[in-house]
Amino acid sequence: MESSATGTRCRKCGTHVTQQFARVFGDNGDEVHGCPECTTYREMQAGDHLSGESEPADTSP
């Protein structure tokens, strides 16, 4: 997450996000790796936007 005079930004696309968004959808350091501009809400809720931290899909019948 980049903090600057303009605020917090998505590391993937650079779009501004709020501090609250970073706390909810960011990683443990509040770094945002995907936002609504570059990631779907479904991916964010599942954690798919976090590098290597999502749970594997259930492939059992």
Image (tube, rainbow, N blue to C red):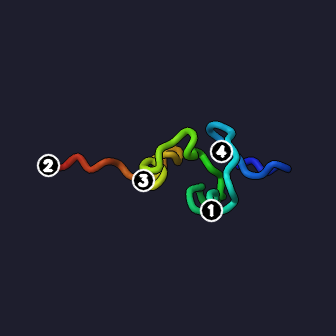
Disc 1 element:
helix
Rendered residue at 69%/39% (across/down): 14
Instruction: Inspect the image, locate mark 4, and give the three-letter code of the amino acid beneath it.
Output: Cys
Which of discs 4 and 2 lies nearer the camera? The answer is: 4
Q: Residue at x 59, y 55 (%)?
A: 26
What is the x, y in percent for residue 4? 82, 49
Q: Residue at x 68, y 56 (%)?
A: 18
The answer to which of 23 and 57 lies nearer the viewer is 23
Going from N to C along the chain, the mark reached first, 1 or 2, is 1
Evaluate if marks 4 and 2 touch, with contact meaning CB atoms under 8 Å apart: no
Q: Which residue is mark 1?
A: 23
Q: Quadrant of residue 10?
A: top right
> Tags 4 and 1 in contact by the CB under 8 Å rule?
no
- Residues under labels 4 and 2: Cα distance? 37 Å
Residue depth check, mark 2 versus mark 3: number of the one nearer the observer: 3
Crowding at mark 2 (Cα within 10 Å: few <14, some 14-19, many 20+): few
Q: Position of residue 30 (x, y in %)?
A: 65, 58
Report, in whole angstroms, how far the alpha carbon at label 3 lies from the one at label 4: 17 Å
Q: Disc 2 designates what residue?
A: 61
Q: Is residue 60 left or right of residue 51?
A: left
> Mark 3 — residue?
46
Within-10-Å neighbours for mark 3: few <14, some 14–19, many 20+ = few
Q: Please say if 51 is above or below 27.
A: above
Numbered badge on residue 10: 4
Q: Position of residue 57 (x, y in %)?
A: 31, 48
Find numbered disc 3 in the image and state the secondary structure of the residue it sits on.
helix
The amino acid at mark 1 is Arg
Tell me which amino acid carries mark 3.
Ala
